[in-house]
Image: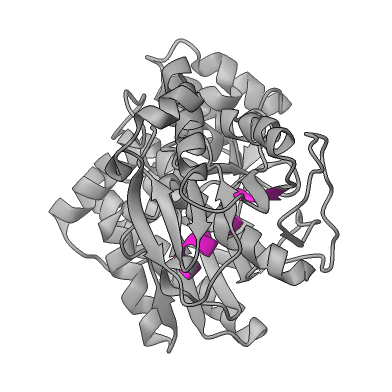
Amino acid sequence: MRAAALAMQNTDDVVAHVVPLACPVKPVLAMGAWFKNTLCITADRQALISRNVGDLDTSAACLDHEALAYALLTMADKPLAIAHDLHPDFHSTRFAVALSAELGVPLIGVQHHHAHIAAVCAEHDFNAPIIGLALDGVGLGADGTPWGGELLRVEGASFQRLGHLRPLALPGGDKAAREPWRMAAAVLHELGRGEEIATRFADEPAAPMVSTMLQRDFNCPRTSSMGRLFDAAAGLLGICRKMEFEAQAAIALEQLAQGHGAVAPIMDGYTITPSPLMGEGWGEGVSLANTLSPTPLPSRERGGMQLDFLPLLAVLADCRDAAYGAALFHATLAAGLAEWAWRATAQQTAATVALGGGCFLNKVLSQALIPALAQRGLRVLTAVNLAPGDSAISLGQAWVAMHQLEKGN
């Protein structure tokens, strides 16, 4: 790996983005996550972010990831810590453990959605408390469950989970993330319309089995993922049954909504209620002391706000105009998210909202949500030079780790 790193003699072969920072910072190395992996090292008054390795699902990508880590280490002082995602099975996490042992420096685990919001804060050099909307496909939560539609209060090294989307079942686990019809089936089951699954998806051989799985709650983990909510809407509207590439269903929904044009949201298409599920309310960068053993986070506050779009999905289940349904989905989504964030700012006495996560690559959603937040008197921070998705995770991890180190002094 060191030989491969030395072969990258041109900085352009290693560094894709440089984010200026207002003050000198402690050197940390951040390893990124699984999808669209990048690495980040802090030096002097800047954060150096590597080129995109891609998804860490091949040996070539994993070797490239390791070589980039060693190359970045030549560009700064020895890091005081190595930051990584909480998921223990990511190659980036496992290599972080090995590298921390090699260098003799501590590990700092950073929750995925905390990192999404922290990346936006880093680009704006924003250090005050902020409300974050972190919306993506999936990231391991501090409670060990799959998150993806999160309302957070973030302040440097610490975050508090203020709310989440209503969790939906994933019939068949990860397979549901590739087959939107399964997410649609999960919604029909939630609506008390499970008997429709086998007939509605009669051309899917697994439909009777999925119906039974949902009835018995067998192999149906639940997730608060916004990405899976998009999949459910696409499945209900008959837009995309199975995906051939990442986010295909969400992209199809966005394109249909753009083609249709703006519509008014359904104001009773969502509810905001106390969450029945939230336990671990807050967390911060966690030192794992060179081990992958779970580290439970302390709980300061029970409860939170659950945003539930099931009423909207019930309308989409009977919608015969897919383009109108796609536009209605985006409009109602933006209305619900704006009210959710506004309620959080009122409770937390914070007037700034950060938008992070891959769902904000969706221009229809962003262009509806940002003005809705501004109309409520809120300042909105978004990604500037980096994409809002997982390629910015390493910057967010580094930002959290830097604050964690400062806090320790």
Answer left or right for 371 relative to 342. Answer: left
Find residue 80 and report its horizontal and vertical position in percent: 67, 54
Q: Main secondary structure of the magenta part?
A: helix
Q: Residue at x 37, y 83 (%)?
A: 374
Find residue 145 and report its horizontal and vertical position in percent: 70, 41
Answer left or right for 349 relative to 181. Answer: right
Q: Is residue 305 visible?
A: no
Q: Nearer the viewer, residue 290 or 163?
A: 290
Where on the picture, by quarter, is residue 386?
A: bottom left
Q: Nearer the viewer, residue 8 or 35?
A: 8
Does residue 185 belong to the magenta stretch? no
**What are the residue bounds of the magenta stretch?**
108-121
Does residue 116 belong to the magenta stretch? yes
Q: Residue at x 54, y 67 (%)?
A: 132
Q: Residue at x 60, y 54 (%)?
A: 28
Q: Is residue 184 visible?
A: yes
Q: Nearer the viewer, residue 164 or 113?
A: 113
Q: Residue at x 37, y 14 (%)?
A: 203
Where on the picture, by quarter, is residue 144?
A: top right
Compared with residue 182, is residue 43 higher up or lower down, i.e. above or below? Answer: below
Pick out the residue farthest to the top: 205
Answer left or right for 160 relative to 242. Answer: right
Find residue 168 and report its horizontal and vertical position in percent: 59, 42
